[in-house]
Amino acid sequence: CVADMYSAGLTDYVASKAALAAFHHCIRLEIRKSQLEEYIHTTLIMPYLLDSPMFENVSMPWYVNLLFPRLEVAATAERIACAIESRELVVRLPRILKLICPLLGLLPWRFRDFVTEIAGGRDAIDSMHA
């Protein structure tokens, strides 16, 4: 859900995820317009933090870790495979993000920034560079 949730210190990473989401939606419509959806399918995977070495030094507030534990790599890979096999369009992991991310988009920007900051979006990445 990084494409919908912003964080200080991750500008290039978040921008690349947002671009990938936009690319997915555009190419999906191109495939549909060309009447090729029977042959070509795309699935956009939007995961939260994986419990992997890439983010092992990211320090989230305790309440965020309690509400959103990091995703297990093997279980996430299995979920992705199932999503591709069943031709899902968009998969947000964990599933609660399917509700939370669109709701964040409805918030006024100042309130959204406040929510992002209390969730660790202002300085959670700082621990990676310490």
Image (spheres, rainbow, N blue to C red):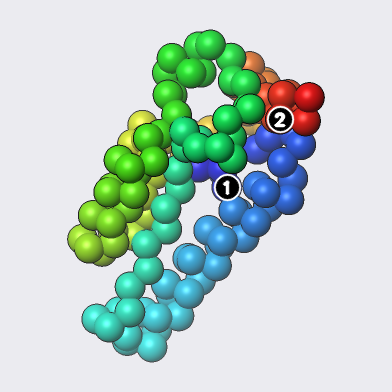
Quarter of the figure with residue 70 = top left
Which percent across, then down, holds residue 110? 71, 26
Looking at the image, which residue sits at the far front?
A: 53
37 vs 122: above or below: below
The tag on residue 3 is 1
What is the three-letter code of the residue carrying label 1?
Answer: Ala
One can see residue 100 in this view:
no
Q: Earlier in the sequence, mark 2 or mark 1?
A: 1
Q: Is residue 77 left or right of residue 9?
A: left
Identify the residue at image location x=48%, y=18%.
Answer: 65
What is the three-letter code of the residue carrying label 2?
Answer: Met
Identify the residue at image location x=62%, y=21%.
Answer: 59
Quadrant housing the C terminus: top right
72 vs 18: above or below: above
One can see residue 78 in this view:
yes
In the picture of the structure, the residue carrying the numbered disc 2 is: 128
Q: For this rendering, which residue is in front, 130 or 96?
A: 130
Q: Is residue 100 left or right of residue 112?
A: left
Which percent across, then down, holds residue 104? 53, 33
Quarter of the figure with residue 68 = top left
